[in-house]
Amino acid sequence: MKNEKRTNYRKRLELLKSGIPRLVVRKTDKSVIAHIVEYKDGGDKTLMMVRGSELKKFGWNFSNKNSPASYLLGYLLGKKSNIKEVILDKGNRTLKENSFIYYVMKGMHDFGVNVHSEDIKIDEKRLYGEHIENYYPNRKGNQFSAVGEKVKNIKEDFNKTLENIKNGK
């Protein structure tokens, strides 16, 4: 069923019966998008959606689809939605260790949203972009041309962006 990209209606029905709004997270070529979706009689209704590109308003000048950006996105979604609990709707995805979805969930959890999930598996070093900072000296070509030497301060920028989200700047 997964290879055929078809919906597993048994799993979907379990999610819908819970009555808890669903967290739906997807990655595009340029960004991560997170939705809080609720089932209504006429179909699903998106209660709140945030895109990685919104992080720029809060001072984030790096990729919108890496681990730190995913965490910040989750935190922002939690703040904007004023929702108390969500359940992850991962669709047909198999979550791997350090999946960007875990970072979105962790951001929401840290904001105070009860995220119903078995486990949120993140690496603290990846959360602060240490893996990006360590890779920078080994860069090839123009991979970091947009951010250049700022990569060396990614943890600082992460903390500043998170503070701006908390303060609504």
Image (cartoon, grey):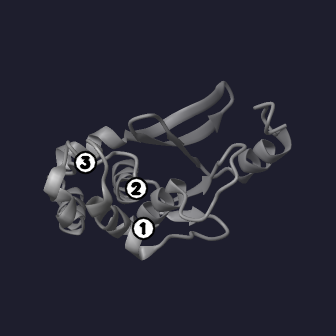
Q: Amino acid at mark 3?
A: Phe
- Residue 43 visible: yes
Quarter of the image holding residue 145? top left
Nearest the viewer among 140 and 65 is 140
* Element marked by disc 2: helix
User: Is 93 above or below relative to 117?
Assistant: above
Residue 78: assigned label: 2
Which residue is found at the position 15% from the left and 57% from the top? 150
Asked if the residue under mark 2 is in contact with the one under mark 3, i.e. CB atoms within 8 Å, the reply is no
> CA–CA distance between discs 3 and 1?
34 Å
Percent x, y of residue 163: 20, 64
Which residue does the numbered mark 1 point to in the structure image?
A: 112
Q: 2 left or right of 59? A: right
Asked if the residue under mark 1 is in contact with the one under mark 3, i.e. CB atoms within 8 Å, the reply is no
Badge 2 crowding class, 10 Å Cα cut-off, few under 14, some 14 to 19, many 20 or more, is: many
Q: Amino acid at mark 2?
A: Gly
Which residue is found at the position 85% from the left and 44% from the top? 10
Q: Nearer the viewer, mark 3 or mark 1?
A: 3
Q: 91 left or right of 76? A: right
Which residue does the numbered mark 3 point to in the structure image?
A: 144
Badge 1 crowding class, 10 Å Cα cut-off, few under 14, some 14 to 19, many 20 or more, is: some
- Residue 59 visible: no
